[in-house]
Image (cartoon, grey):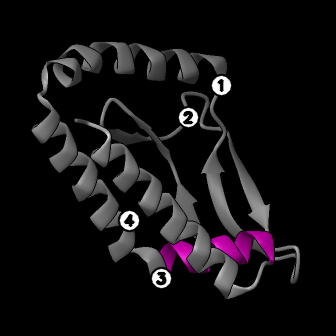
Amino acid sequence: MNEVRLLIGGTDIAAKSGATFERNSPISGNAVSRAAAASADDARAACDAAAKAFPAWAALGPNARRKLLMEAAQKLRAKSAEFSRLCTEETGAIAGWGHFNTGFAAAIIEEAAAMTT
């Protein structure tokens, strides 16, 4: 089963309350992932971390931003088979739908990279 935690301030953590929820396959009914159930406190912590990180991002020039975004897109594409599998398990969709959405997400990030200048 895939375990999904929160990413706050660059750290992979559980929800402060420890609460989780399961996502079940609509085909088999079996649990396919367990995710952290974020609370309002977790959301505030994420907002605070983003606000803290923003000045460093804002100080980056367009080439540095483009490089980071392109690296993110490449990492997403490198894990496309895994993301597609998880997507189809959680939604019951066909594999092609999972592959399309993973590729589309990477393309959006690449488009954002192109818009840095």
Report the magenta stretch's main SS.
Answer: helix
Task: Tell me the residue that label 1 is attached to.
Answer: 39
Q: Earlier in the sequence, mark 2 or mark 3?
A: 2
**For mark 2, does the 10 Å Cα neighbourhood hold few (<14), some (14 to 19), or many (20 or more) residues?**
some
Q: Which residue is denoted by mark 2 in the rendering?
A: 15
Q: Which residue is mark 4?
A: 76
Q: Is residue 64 left or right of residue 93?
A: left
Separation (CA) of disc 4 from disc 2 = 24 Å
Which quarter of the figure has residue 74?
bottom left
The quadrant holding residue 89 is: bottom right
Q: Residues within 10 Å of mark 3 (few under 14, many from 20)?
A: some
> Dot 3: what SS?
helix
Magenta-colored stretch includes residue 23: no
Q: Which mark is first along the chain, 3 or 4? A: 4
Q: Which residues are magenta?
A: 82-92
Q: Which residue is depicted at the point 53% across and 68% down?
A: 102
Q: In 3D space, how far apart are the residues under numbered discs 1 and 4 (Cα atoms)?
A: 27 Å
In which quadrant of the rendered view does residue 22 lie?
A: bottom right
The residue tagged 3 is 81
